[in-house]
Amino acid sequence: MTSPRGTVFRTNPNKDFLRRGYDTGHLERLFRSLGRPLKYLGLPAWEMLDILEWDEYLSRFTTIEREENQQHLMFLRANVKDIEHRLYSLYGEFDEILLTGRDQYGKMPEWPYDVVNLDYFGGLLYSDFSRPQAIRKLIRNQATYKSSFLLLVTQHIRDCDTSGEKKSFLDDLRRSLKNSSIDAQMHGAIDRIIDWYAEPGTPDAARQALYLNMLLRDVGEAEYFDVTSRPAILYAGTGGAVMIHFVTDFTFRPGISHKVGSSQPIADVLTFSVREAHDGASIRDRHFPPNI
């Protein structure tokens, strides 16, 4: 699957509900914790619906747009909404900007950020693994400034896992969990839950949810962040595409050189249900892994 560059973003009731009824609460919590407006980096599309929804919590915001006509519409909308003076816009592909440090005109992101909203049209895994690498670079950049942040990621449930990345990930996770478990009696429980994720009949949404949550946890801990993940949420997006949504806290722990052990037990992440936004009004559990 290639990234659908020609796709035009359209919101819908489930997306609106997640933005307003779920994500806003997390931004408000961070806003109150820091006691100041939040600096934003994201892929908001030209309508900037997330920025306008969260305006009272935001200060300056950096947007990334890869289509010239869409960037022009974004500037016009910012002008109409009287927020153009707070807008810093980068042009190009998000992954390339993160990996190279510059957009197509040589402009650089204004690190660090308090909230990062990566609302992708495409999936997570492509043959060059540029998207996971870009997310790693994002976390490392935040760590350079010792800056805690809130990360929101939305992506297509389908990706291009032609190399068997998720299978390899599950094999490595099984070994890692067994090697770190002092109690050998836990090995059976570890096998049961990893076998469930590996089963062909298990929805790929569950594997993708675990894969990204563990990727964020592993990279974050190595960069001195205490990582708090949450169950992924499915919803029907543009053109009926099934999207999956993540919200993760990264709390920087200064004054250490060892890998952080997150406060959230890893068993919680392994046994998260996959949830679903329903009828633009509620969130319900949909897929349940076995308990440990």
Image (cartoon, rainbow, N blue to C red):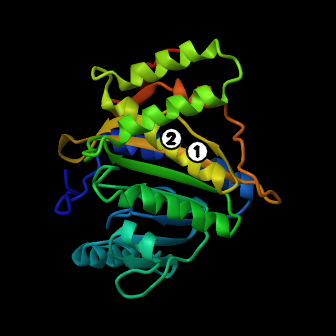
Determine contact: label 1, label 2, CB under 8 Å: yes
Three-letter amino acid code of the residue under disc 1: Arg
Circle 1 residues within 10 Å: few <14, some 14–19, many ≥20: many
Q: Is residue 137 above or below residue 121?
A: below
Secondary structure category for the residue under label 2 = helix
Q: Residue at x 51, y 76 (%)?
A: 109
Quickly name the residue at label 2: 213
Q: Residue furthest right?
A: 255
Horizontal side of 225 relative to 239 (left or right) equals: right
Q: Is residue 63 above or below residue 161?
A: below
Quickly name the residue at label 1: 217
Three-letter amino acid code of the residue under disc 2: Asn
* Quadrant in the picture for residue 257: bottom right
Question: Is residue 279 at least partly visible in the picture?
Answer: no
Question: Is residue 121 at least partly visible in the picture?
Answer: yes
- Seen from the viewer's position, the closer of residues 172 and 20 is 172
In the rendered image, residue 161, in percent from the top left (x then y), is placed at 28, 44
Circle 2 residues within 10 Å: few <14, some 14–19, many ≥20: many
- Seen from the viewer's position, the closer of residues 19 and 241 is 241
In the rendered image, residue 102, in percent from the top left (x then y), is placed at 44, 81
